[in-house]
Image (spheres, rainbow, N blue to C red):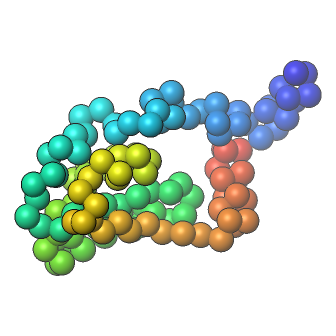
């Protein structure tokens, strides 16, 4: 335990300890209800955010992308969720976009982010 404290003093607390308890639940974020989208006449555009991949840049573009392609943006605001929420949406009417990054680059970026 002393060694872990020394490591934490050098690099900061491990990222898994900073994750909010709610983010580990297999449910949608508070206030986000999938039933709202069940009868949507437009195709749904879902932005699945993956940390440290440049998704914030993509997130800034998704409202315009949804508007230009005549889709409903789900969710309409900056909200993070996991795939379990996407499973509750109508699967025949959905397009999911995300941004990927090389796993090693992402791990290095996460390391330096956790260090600050």
Taking the image as drawn, is residue 60 in sight?
no
Q: Horizontal and vertical percent for residue 48?
A: 41, 58
**Quadrant, the N terminus:** top right
Q: Is residue 95 above or below residue 29?
A: below
Q: Horizontal and vertical percent for residue 55?
A: 45, 63
**Quadrant, the C terminus:** top right
Q: Is residue 52 above or below residue 6?
A: below
Q: Horizontal and vertical percent for residue 71?
A: 17, 69
Q: How many marks?
A: 0
Indicate left or right for 79 with 17 as reference: left
In this view, which residue lies farthest toward the front? 92
Viewer-closest of 88 and 3:
88
Q: What residue is at 35 percent from the left and 51 percent from the top?
A: 87
Indicate left or right for 87 with 63 as reference: right
Q: Is residue 39 above or below residue 36?
A: below
- The quadrant where residue 10 appears: top right
Viewer-closest of 48 and 19:
48
Q: What residue is at 72 percent from the left and 59 percent from the top?
A: 108
Indicate left or right for 113 with 79 as reference: right
Viewer-closest of 51 and 30:
30
Q: What residue is at 65 percent from the left and 39 percent from the top?
A: 15
Q: Horizontal and vertical percent for residue 81?
A: 40, 46
């Amino acid at each position: 335990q002393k060694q872990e404290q020394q490591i934490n003093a050098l690099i900061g607390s491990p990222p898994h300890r900073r994750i909010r308890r709610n983010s580990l639940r297999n449910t949608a974020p508070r206030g986000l209800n999938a039933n709202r989208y069940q009868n949507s006449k437009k195709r749904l555009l879902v932005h699945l955010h993956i940390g440290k991949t440049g998704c914030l840049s993509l997130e800034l573009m998704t409202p315009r992308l949804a508007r230009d392609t005549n889709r409903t943006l789900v969710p309409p605001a900056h909200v993070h969720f996991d795939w379990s929420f996407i499973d509750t949406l109508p699967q025949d009417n959905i397009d999911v976009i995300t941004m990927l990054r090389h796993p090693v680059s992402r791990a290095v970026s996460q390391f330096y982010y956790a260090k600050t």
